């Protein structure tokens, strides 16, 4: 089983969380979007949260600022986290605004708060698991969508709760984090989403 666990670290890498959150938002929310609007929604999120971070990753690696996508060193995390905050802030001010996509807006706002928490913890030499931040935030968001739209997603929620455990186990097996860092990441991912959940439930 241990040799398969790293698979979950790659498939549920934090870079995929914004796209996954958008997918479940479209799937579970009652908002109506035309096909053209759907394409535009996913395209802007794909460009801002996936393509641009990949491009910056290769630039930073060329400059010797980071080593791998897993950002194992504390010193390598500061620039990517600030970049993530900047890109999400651009997204929620220019595209995913609260008047057009209120629930998705709050999901990304939670992501900004979580990233800022992880960034500030770096100055205390604490490396919160960004993987756990991402998967736990997505899980709370799915639960919130289910409650808000009165959709029975018990099996989906159970699946994502299990994924939290699998992602955490994969990070331990890969020796990327300690149990404490995983717990901190889980808290940093869930608390902002739970706080913002209060605003729209």
Image (spheres, helix red, strand yellow):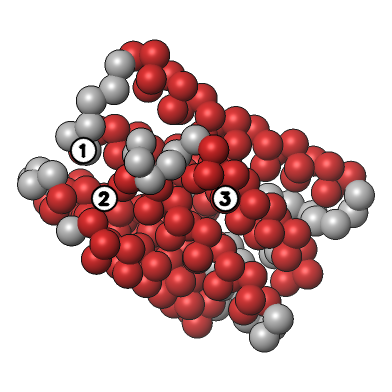
> Residue at the location (32% across, 69% down)?
195
> Residue at the location (83% across, 49% down)?
60
Label 3 neighbour load within 10 Å: few <14, some 14-19, many 20+: some
Q: Earlier in the sequence, mark 3 or mark 1?
A: 1
Quarter that holds the N terminus:
bottom left
Q: Is residue 122 visible?
A: yes
Q: Nearer the viewer, residue 163 or 89?
A: 89
Tell me the element at label 2.
helix
Measured from the top left, where is residue 90 in percent x and y? Answer: 59, 44
Q: Earlier in the sequence, mark 2 or mark 3?
A: 3
Tell me the element at label 3.
helix
Q: Give left or right: position of 115 versus 155.
A: right
> Residue at the location (45% across, 39% down)?
96
Image mark for residue 89:
3
> Residue at the location (67% across, 42% down)?
53
* Residue 101 in the image: above or below residue 140: above
Which residue does the numbered mark 2 point to in the structure image? 142
Q: Are marks 3 and 1 in contact (CB under 8 Å)?
A: no
Question: Which is closer to the viewer, label 3 or label 1?
Answer: 3
Find the distance from the CA under tag 2 to the CA under tag 1.
8 Å
Find the distance from the CA under tag 2 to the CA under tag 3.
22 Å
Q: In the rendered image, which quarter is residue 47 located in? A: top right
Which residue does the numbered mark 1 point to in the structure image? 28
Q: Give left or right: position of 70 versus 187.
A: right
Measured from the top left, where is residue 133 in percent x and y? Answer: 47, 63
Q: Residue furthest front?
A: 99
Question: Which is closer to the viewer, label 2 or label 3?
Answer: 3
Q: Are marks 2 and 1 in contact (CB under 8 Å)?
A: yes
């Amino acid at each position: 089983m241990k040799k398969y666990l790293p698979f979950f670290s790659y498939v549920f890498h934090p870079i995929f969380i914004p796209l996954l959150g958008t997918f479940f938002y479209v799937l579970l929310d009652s908002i109506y979007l035309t096909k053209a609007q759907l394409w535009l929604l996913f395209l802007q999120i794909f460009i801002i949260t996936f393509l641009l971070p990949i491009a910056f990753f290769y630039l930073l690696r060329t400059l010797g600022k980071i080593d791998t996508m897993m950002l194992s060193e504390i010193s390598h995390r500061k620039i990517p986290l600030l970049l993530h905050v900047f890109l999400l802030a651009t997204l929620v001010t220019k595209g995913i605004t609260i008047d057009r996509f209120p629930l998705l807006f709050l999901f990304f706002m939670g992501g900004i708060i979580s990233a800022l928490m992880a960034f500030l913890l770096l100055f205390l030499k604490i490396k919160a698991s960004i993987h756990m931040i991402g998967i736990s935030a997505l899980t709370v968001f799915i639960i919130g969508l289910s409650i808000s739209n009165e959709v029975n997603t018990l099996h989906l929620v159970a699946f994502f709760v299990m994924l939290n455990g699998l992602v955490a186990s994969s990070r331990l097996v890969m020796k990327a984090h300690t149990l404490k860092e995983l717990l901190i990441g889980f808290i940093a991912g869930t608390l902002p989403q739970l706080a913002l959940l209060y605003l729209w439930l």
